[in-house]
Structures are given as C-alpha cells and as structure tokens.
Amino acid sequence: IREPIFHLLRALILHPGLPSPALCQQAAMSEASLYRYVQLFNHSIFPKIGVSIASNPFHLSGQHTNLLLFSSIFLFKQSRMSEWPFPDYPKEMVEDFVSLM
C-alpha cells in the first residue's frame, strides 16, 4: 500500500471503531492528515455510490451491501495471497464473487 488514503481505508475496514489516536497510528498518519483524507474521500465519487467516512468514532458509513462490496473489492485489490486478512473466507471465493460484478 503506497497511498496514505489506502492505509486509512484498510485500517477502517480491518479495525472498525478505533479511537482517533489508534486509527492515526494504524494508518501511519497524523491527526491533521486523518481529517484531511476523510474530507478528500467524502468529496470524491465514493459518496455518490453510497460509501463515506463518518466520525465519532471514524468508520465507513453507508448501506450494508455497499460497504461489503466496497470493502471486498478494496481488500481484494490491496492484498496478496500471503497477506489475505480473512482466514475464514478463501480468497478464491472472493475472487470469483468480484469477477461476477
């Protein structure tokens, strides 16, 4: 993961409900950067497809199906087989699901 926004999104997906200081640490950014990237994300195309970042605590917000689809595609695109974060969900099944989209 190269872009800071990707670190933030990964932290929001894999560690929901973290308080701001822990989220900043997990995403490797300052609190000022956290607010800047949340604003950037919320002014992008993602709210138009039903996904945004809410605060208190910071979390992904939207309809459950939109969040699942966004999270699945994001993690699928960001993860290598050796880093797949969901041992209960074989990556091959997720790949097949995403390919149907």
Image (cartoon, rainbow, N blue to C red):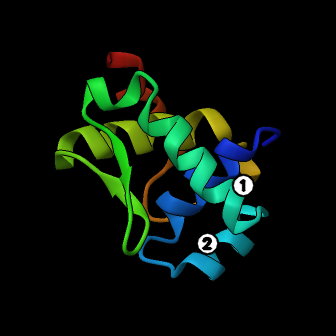
Please name whichever residue, 93 or 84, is drawn nearer the observer in this view of the structure: 84
| Left or right placement of residue 99 versus residue 48 in this view | right
Q: Which mark lies nearer to you, 1 or 2?
A: 2
> Where is the C terminus found, in terms of image quarters?
top left
The residue to which callout 1 is attached is 83
Please state which amino acid type lies under the numbered disc 1.
Answer: Glu
What residue appears at the point 51 percent right and 82 percent down from the top-left corner? 19
Whether 47 is drawn above or below 86: the answer is: above
Label 1, secondary structure: give it: helix
Q: Which mark is residue 52?
A: none
| Number of numbered labels in the structure image | 2
Please state which amino acid type lies under the numbered disc 2.
Answer: Leu
Label 2, residues with CA under 10 Å away: few <14, some 14-19, many ≥20? many
Q: Nearer the N terminus, badge 1 or badge 2?
A: 2
Residue 86 visible in the shown view: no
> Where is the N terminus found, in terms of image quarters?
top right
The CA distance from mark 1 to mark 2 is: 20 Å
Label 2, secondary structure: give it: helix
* Residue 24 on image: x %, y %: 68, 70
* Residue 89 on image: x %, y %: 43, 55
Whether 94 is drawn above or below 23: the answer is: above
What residue appears at the point 61 percent right and 45 percent down from the top-left corner? 37
The residue to which callout 2 is attached is 23
| Left or right placement of residue 84 versus residue 14 in this view | right
